Image (cartoon, coloured by chain):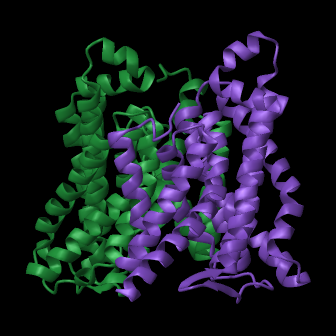
Chain colours: A green, B purple
Amino acid sequence: MSNARFGLAVLAVAIVIAAASRLVTNDYFFSAAYTVLQFVVLATAWNILGGYTGYVNFGSAAFFATGAYTSIFLYKAVHAPLPVMIVCGTLMAALLGLAVGYLTLRMRGVFFAIATLALSVVLYTLVVNWDYVGGARGAYILQPRQMPFGFTRYVQVLFSTMLLMAAFSIVVARVIETSAIGRGLAAIRDDELAAECAGVPTLRLKALAAATSGGLMGMAGTTFPYYLSYVEPGAAFNLSYAVNSIAMPLIGGMMSWMGPLIGALLLGTVQQVVQVTVSSEWNLLIVGFLLVAFVTAAPRGIMGWVSRRFGGSGP
Amino acid sequence: MEFSSALFLNAIVAGLLLGGFYAAVSVGVSISFGMLDVVNIAHPGFIILGSYIAFILSDRFGWDPIAVSLAVSPLFFLLGAVIYRIYYICFERRGQESLRGLAFFFGILFITEVALVLVFGVDYRMARTAYSDTTWRLGSVDFPLRLVVPFLVSLAMVLAVQAFLTRTFFGRAVLAVAQDPLALRLMGVRTLRVKEFAFALSIATAGIAGAFLIVIQPVQPSLGREYIGLVFAVCVLGGLGSIWGTLAGAFILGLAESFTSTFFGPSWAPAVSFGLLLGTLALRPSGLFGR
C-alpha cells in the first residue's frame, strides 16, 4: 500500500470512529479513550527513535510536558486557540529533541539515554521555579465555551483531536518506516559504524528522528491542560508517561508502526480497567512487571510472536 | 566582608562533605557502568531501597542506620548477583544489552519505586541518630555531624573499594575484565564469575550509600530519579572506570551544588548535575581523568 493511500485509510478510520463516538453518551468513555489514544501517540513517537533507530529515550515525560507547558504559556499570554497551541507545542518539543539529540547522539547510545533521564528532572526544576506558568502550585485552564463542528461537550472535542493526532503519528511513523530515512535508521540500529562507513548520514538522521519523536510526544501534551483543567508539574512530568511509552512498543513489537499501536491499545485499556477497579499504584506496578517480563522473555513483543507463530515474513 | 567569607567557607565545607557522600553513591555505577559496561540505571533505586531498610531497622530497634546498612550489605550483594545473572542470561549473552538491557533496568527502577510507594506511601522519612542534632563549630564554619559521619564512612568505603581493586588478585581480575574481557576468557578465566562478583559489589555499595542518604536528608520513594543524573554525571566527569576519577568528580559536583544552593537557592541544585553532565559529554567525553 502506498503511503498516500495508507494515510487516507487511517484518516477514514479516524473519521468513522469520531463519527461513531457521537452515539456514545457516557462521558467516562471519552475520558478513558482520550488517555488510551494519548498513549498511542506517545508509544508511536517513542518507537520512531527507540524502535527504528535503537536509541532509548527515557524522557518522554519531559517532551510531553514541554507540549503541555507551551499550551499553558500561550493560554496565559495570548489566549491562543487550540490549533495554535498544538502547532507551537509540537515545534517546541521538536526543537528540544533536536537540541538534546544533537548534543548527545554523537556518543554511544547510553549517553543519550542518561541525558534524557536527567532532562526530565531539569525541566521539572525549571517549571517549578517558573511562576508565570504556575510554578509548583500549578495552573488553571478554563475550557472554551463555544464548540467547533457542533460538538456538545468539550471532552468530545479533545477526544476527536487526540484521535486525529494518533492517526497523524501513525502515518508519520509509517512514512518514515517505508522511506529511505527508515532504511537509514534501521542501518544505524543494526550497525552504526557500518552505516557510517556506507555513507549513511548517521548524525543527521538520528537528530531528525529525535526531533520527530520529541515533536510528536509534545503534540500529545498540548491538549493535556484542557483535558485536566488544572496542571501541576507533578502531573505533567509523571514518570508513568516515560514508562508507558517504553513498555508499549516493547510489548507490542518495535519493528513496525503496528507494534506500538497494539501495545498502547492493549496496555492502555488494561490500565484504565485496573485504575478503576484496583488503584493507580497497582496499575503502575503491573506496567513495570509487564515491561520487565516482556523484555526478558519475549524480546520481540506480540508482533514478533505473531509473525513467528503464523509464519509471516517477520521483521 | 566577614559575613560573606564565612558563607564562602561554609559553602566549601558543605560541598566537600556532600562530595564524599556523592562518591559513595557513584562508586557502584563507576564499577558497573565504567568497568563492566552494564548500564545500571536502577542503581539509585537500590540506594533508596537501602535507605528504607536502614530506616525500618533503626526506627524499630534503635540501631544506628549506618551500622545496620553495613550488616545487611551481604543481602544487597546477593541481590546484585541475582540481578546480574538475569541480565547476563537474558541480554548480555544474546548481545542485546544496549536497548533491552536499559529498558530492563528502567523497569526494575520503576518497580522498586512503586513498590516502596505501596508499602510506605509518599511521605518523607528520615532516620534519627545519636549525632543527628550535633554540630561541631570551627571558627565560623559548621561541621554538622549528620554530614561528617556519612562523609567519613563514605571515604572509607570508596578507599576500601579502590584498595580491593588494585591490591587483591580478584580485584585485579575485575580491572582486567574492564580492559579486555575476551583476552581474559582466552586465558581461561571465567569472566562471568568475575563480573557477577563486581556487579554484586556495586549493589552492596548502593545499599550502604542508602543509609548515608537517609541520615543526611529525608527520603521518599521517587527521590531516586534525582540521583540518576547525579551518579552518571559524577562517573562521566571523573572518567569512566576510574575510582580516583569518581572521587574527584564527586567533590567537584558537591562543590558546584553547594555553591549553587548557597548563592542561587536550593531549588536550582538538581540542574547543576545535568549541566555538568551535558557539558562534559559535549567538551570532553572521556572525562577529566579518563582512561
Q: Does residue A154 appear to the left or right of B68 in the view shown?
A: left
Q: From the viewer's side, name the closer residue of B56 and B62.
A: B62
Looking at the image, can residue A170 be seen?
Answer: no
Q: From the viewer's side, name the closer residue of A53 and B194.
A: B194
Looking at the image, can residue B177 be seen?
Answer: yes
Q: From the viewer's side, name the closer residue of B207 and A100.
A: B207
Q: Where is B43 relative to B214, above or below? A: above
Q: What is the quadrant of the N terminus of chain A in the image?
A: top left
What percent of the width, then of the height, locates residue B52?
A: 74, 72
Image-quadrant location for residue A209: top left
Instruction: Please give the name of the residue rendered at 69% of the width and 79% of the height, measured from the top-left corner.
Output: B146
What percent of the width, then of the height, locates residue B239?
A: 51, 40
Q: Does residue A182 appear to the left or right of A121 in the view shown?
A: left
Q: Does residue B280 appear to the left or right of B29 in the view shown?
A: left
Instruction: Please give the name of the residue rendered at 23% of the width and 51% of the height, measured from the top-left corner.
Output: A94
Image-quadrant location for residue A203: top left
